[in-house]
Image (cartoon, grey):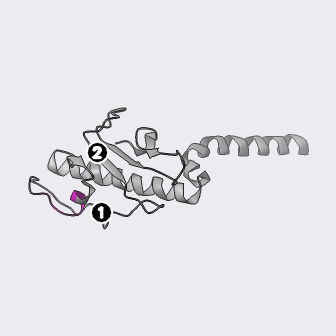
Amino acid sequence: MKTSVLIASVGTLILIAWIVRPRITIWHQPPRMATALTQMATFRVALGAFRDDTGSYPPGTNNLQELLRKPAWATNWLGPYVRDIPKDPWGRAYIYEYPGRHAVSGCPYDLFSLGTPGASNLIANWENPGLRP
């Protein structure tokens, strides 16, 4: 009887871990990678709010500053949408472009970090579904 209870308990824990795992994958990233993903997710939300208010994403390249200050062309701008535009965890600017070159799954803009200097580990919204609108 004790063996069947133990097996049922272990099975239940495995099932819970299998269900919860996709929601906590950011915890398994190296700390700098997790920071970059979190900052980019914040930009994703702010860009969505900007679009909802003004009718468009900030145009051009590296216009994340328009999340902080009202652009001359914008009507119904209700920002600021973020408190600041931080550098990525490696000290470089995030790269934003609208319209994007990698339009994937309805994401009209590109947002990415070059990742670790000297490595080829781009952190990009077109490669990470959680960073798309």
Q: Which mark is residue 82?
A: 1
Report the residue marked by disc 2.
97
Query: 29 or 54, which lies in front?
Result: 29
Label 2, label 1: how far apart the Cα atoms are: 18 Å
Q: Say above or below: 42 vs 105.
A: below
Q: Residue at x 53, y 51 (%)?
A: 118
Q: Position of residue 83 (x, y in %)?
A: 30, 67
Q: Is residue 41 left or right of residue 51?
A: right
Where residue 6 appears, as percent x and y from the top left, is 84, 45
User: Residue 76: horizontal and vertical position, in percent?
Assistant: 11, 55
Quarter holding the C terminus? top left
Instruction: Say which residue appears at 23% left-offset and 63% top-offset.
Output: 68
Q: Is residue 23 left or right of residue 40?
A: right
Q: Position of residue 98 (x, y in %)?
A: 25, 43
Q: Which amino acid, by three-letter code, is at mark 2?
A: Glu
Numbered range of the magenta stretch: 66-71
| Disc marking residue 127 | none
Secondary structure predominantly adopted by residues drawn in magenta: loop
What amino acid is labelled 1 in the image? Val
What is the secondary structure assignment of the residue under circle 1?
loop
Q: Residue at x 27, y 56 (%)?
A: 64
Position of residue 30 in the picture relative to residue 45 (left or right): right
Q: Is residue 1 visible?
A: no
Q: Nearer the viewer, mark 2 or mark 1?
A: 2
- Answer with the quarter of the image where residue 130 lies: top left
**Does dot 2 land on a helix, a strand or a loop?**
strand
Contact flag, marks 2 and 1 (Cβ < 8 Å) = no
Residue 68 in magenta stretch: yes
